Image: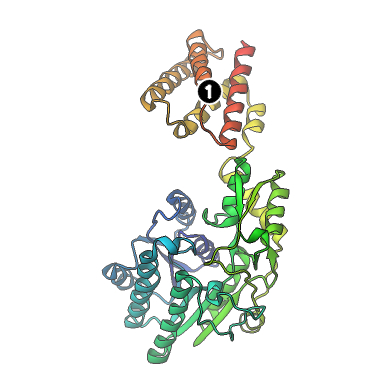
Amino acid sequence: MTILVTGSAGFIGFHTTQKLLQNGEQVIGIDNFNDYYDPSLKEARNKILEQSPNYKLYRGDLTDLSFVQKVLSENKIDKICHLAAQAGVRYSLTNPHAYIQSNLVGFANLIDEAKKNEIKDFIYASSSSVYGNNEKIPFSIEDNVDYPVSLYAATKKSNELIAYSYHHLYNMNCTGLRFFTAYGPYGRPDMAYFSFTKDIIADKTIKIHSHGQMKRDFTYIDDIVVGIIAALKKSYPYEIFNLGNNQIVTLGRFIEVIEQELGISAKKEYLPIQPEEAQITYANIDYSREKLNYHPKTSIEEGIKKFINWYKEYYQIGTQTKNYQQQPIWQKTKQAIIDFQNLAPFWPKIEAEKINQLFLDLLVDLTQDIVTGQKETNSQIMAKIAALESIILIEYDLNQVEKQRLDLMYKNIQEIKNAK
């Protein structure tokens, strides 16, 4: 079976595509790799997917009707899993047109072309945001969702209405999935858990809205994907499902778990709730259990642990000391140079050309020593290492993580010099 997954390089799209490929499906991916957050993370996800011969990517935007027509005309697609969207609640306050274009125009283009190409099964991402400040707890799919508190939520409610009309008019099978605060490895940097982790490591103050009393139904990505796959298999005529964890956690408790996994106490600034934010999200998943056999299993403690482990590995946090200790002096010298190069973008006050030339000269010397079999560091290299040391000792506006990495390189250089 061939499934079109939009937003395949996005957080949920990536994990969904990865699972489909593991299940032996053919996947056509679409992503525009926009810069709402760091595109390099999207590229990293996509690189993993491209290891499978059953994955084919189209780079483009769903708001471009001719692009959508091209993708659907070139491939025999059995089902569509539409996960692409302009995400984020707060961003919709300052960039409303991005949501109108992506979440409404893009959605309309795709579902209409699906109809024209006789693709009957259309599964799409909605959001728990549609519930707004719903007073009935937990949120049920039977609740009224006519009062969204953000434009993002309004666009997702609109998606559900458009999908129903296409089901009614053209007998398409349309299933909407209301995701509840998905989190996990390869997540979105704009999400609170991601930015909190980054700032806590960097020794920056984290801003906590609603004084930490905001409650969320945090749902681990693997559980979300199980629900998506089930919806694709079932392809009901028309349904809406909640995909949540059916457990609420205060934002304060969520931060505590992150602190515990990092072993770092956060600096906190407590702020009032924002008008575009719901005070609570809490999914009633009884209907999802019944129709999708959906049973989320991941606790917040287990999920955050997996995310933190991924974060440390992906961003190479806390690995340098161990690596240096295990390497001989010769390897440490080369590693220090590589690390120094990687950190160069953080130092805007240093002239890039001078740094590049310094490293180039150093690498040439090291290469010559490798060729001649020389294991000792010669005086010319030592002089250049001293030059690196002088740069390291200059004060720069670095965050805590970058300072820690600089300290490691400084200690490494000292060890090389002491070994001489």
As shown in the figure, which amino acid type bears the numbered disc 1?
A: Ile
Identified at 69% across, 58% down, the residue is 252
Residue 137 at x, y = what percent?
A: 67, 78
Label 1 SS: helix
Residue at 42 percent of width and 91 percent of height = 168
Dot 1: within a 10 Å radius of its alpha carbon, few (fewer than 14), some, or many (20 or more) residues?
Answer: some
> What residue occupies the far left of the structure in this picture?
66
On screen, residue 189 above or below 296: above
- Residue 264 screen position, x and y as percent: 70, 43
Instruction: Give the image location of residue 7, x and y in percent.
Output: 44, 64
In the foreground, 188 or 121: 188
Determine the residue located farthest toward the top in the rendered image: 379
Q: Is residue 17 above or below residue 142?
A: above
Q: How is the image coloured?
A: rainbow
Q: Is residue 287 left or right of residue 9?
A: right
271 relative position to 297: left or right:
left
Nearest the eye: 370 or 181: 181
Count all numbered tags in the image, as a single digit.
1
Q: Quadrant of residue 284?
A: bottom right
- The residue wearing badge 1 is 392
The picture places residue 50, in percent across and down from the top left corner, at 45, 55
Rendered view: 182 above or below 171: above
In the depicted view, which residue is nearer to us: 361 or 178? Answer: 178
Is residue 55 visible to us here? no
Residue 65 in view:
yes
Left/right placement of residue 3 relative to residue 191 reads: left
Looking at the picture, does residue 63 appear above or below residue 188?
A: below
Q: Residue at x 63, y 83 (%)?
A: 287
Residue 32 appears left or right of 189: left
* Pick the front one: 249 or 229: 249
| Quarter of the image with the C terminus in it | top right
